Amino acid sequence: MKEPDQFLRMLATVLAIVMGGFLLMSLHFEVTIDANGTKHMSIDFTRERGDEHPAKTMRPSDDETEKLFDSNQKVEQAQKFFNNGKLKETIAFCNEALELNPNNSMAYTFRGSAYFNMREYRRALEDFNKAIELDDLNTLAYYNRGNTYEHLNNRTAAIADFTKAIEFEPTAFEPYHYRGVSYANSGEYEKAIADYTKAIELKPGNGESYHMRGNCRRFLGQKALADADYAKAKSLGFNGSK
């Protein structure tokens, strides 16, 4: 019979696998005890974003579960390093996570994010591509790949990825703001204004969105509206150049 703490560790692992990619799913797990008193667990989950991903059943062995758990733990540590600006450590822990589980989408996502911050955009792009290949609902990977494409001056691809991120997370501020940047850099000022306006609605205290919208309005000859946006941005502490 499995020890209780080992069984709970197994349960936590599979839940972490399901939730680790920032996905929305319907979950059902069932625990049964056989005649020998051994616990067995099965988990059924379906994605809530369409029917293109049929329900799956996961019955990992103890060894597989241990590796998946440890891989996710490595990613959690990598995320902490990333948030503290320790990019080399982020990459190292993501590498260790991928040795344990080569299909860990979030390990590729955070390693790609570290490469992005190191301005190694091609390597970042490779990792985000792999993350999305493994999990086509990985919102963070789409958003970060969009930023990578923008830095590589592929604005059509950037806009497509930001749009995908918005589809998955319609209340997130960042994809609207940065899609606005891509639209503005493409000369599509009306679309950029619409995105900055939505970004402001979601995060009214962000002065940069006001300033960027002001730039677009100035390019369109809307001087009074532009000046109002610049004034608002300044009142919020943002003093970017026009």
Image (cartoon, rainbow, N blue to C red):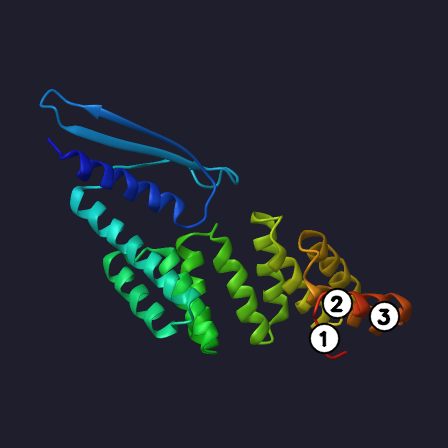
| Element assignment for label 1 | loop
Q: Residues within 10 Å of mark 2 (few under 14, many from 20)?
A: many
Q: Let me know if residue 188 appears in the view.
A: no
Quadrant location of the C terminus in the rendered image: bottom right
Mark 3: few, some, or many residues within 10 Å (few <14, many ≥20)? some
- Residue 90 is drawn in which quadrant? bottom left
Instruction: Say which residue appears at 18% left-offset and 23% top-offset.
Output: 33
Secondary structure type for disc 2: helix
Residue 29 screen position, x and y as percent: 32, 30
Distance from disc 3 to disc 2, alpha carbons, whole Å, reads 10 Å
Q: Amino acid at mark 1?
A: Asn
Q: Quadrant of the N terminus?
A: top left
Q: Which residue is mark 3?
A: 227
- Residue 233's tag is 2
Residue drawn at 22 percent across, 45 percent down: 65
Do tag 3 and tag 1 residues touch (Cβ < 8 Å)?
Answer: no
Residue 13 x/y as whole percent: 28, 44
Instruction: Give the structural element (helix, strand or loop) at label 3.
Output: helix
Measuring from the top left, give residue 218's x and y in whole percent: 84, 73
Query: Mark 3 vs mark 1: which is more N-terminal?
Result: 3
Answer yes or no: do the residues labelled 1 and 2 have beta carbons within 8 Å?
A: yes
Q: First in sequence: mark 3 or mark 2?
A: 3
Q: In this orientation, which residue lies closer to the viewer: 89 or 42?
A: 89
Neighbour tally class for label 1: few under 14, some 14-19, many 20 plus, Cα within 10 Å: some
Residue that carries the numbered disc 1 in the rendered image: 239
Pointer 1 or 2: first along the chain = 2
Question: Where is 197 relative to 225, above or below?
Answer: above
- Amino acid type, residue under disc 3 in the picture: Asp
* Residue 111 versus residue 23 in the image, above or below: below
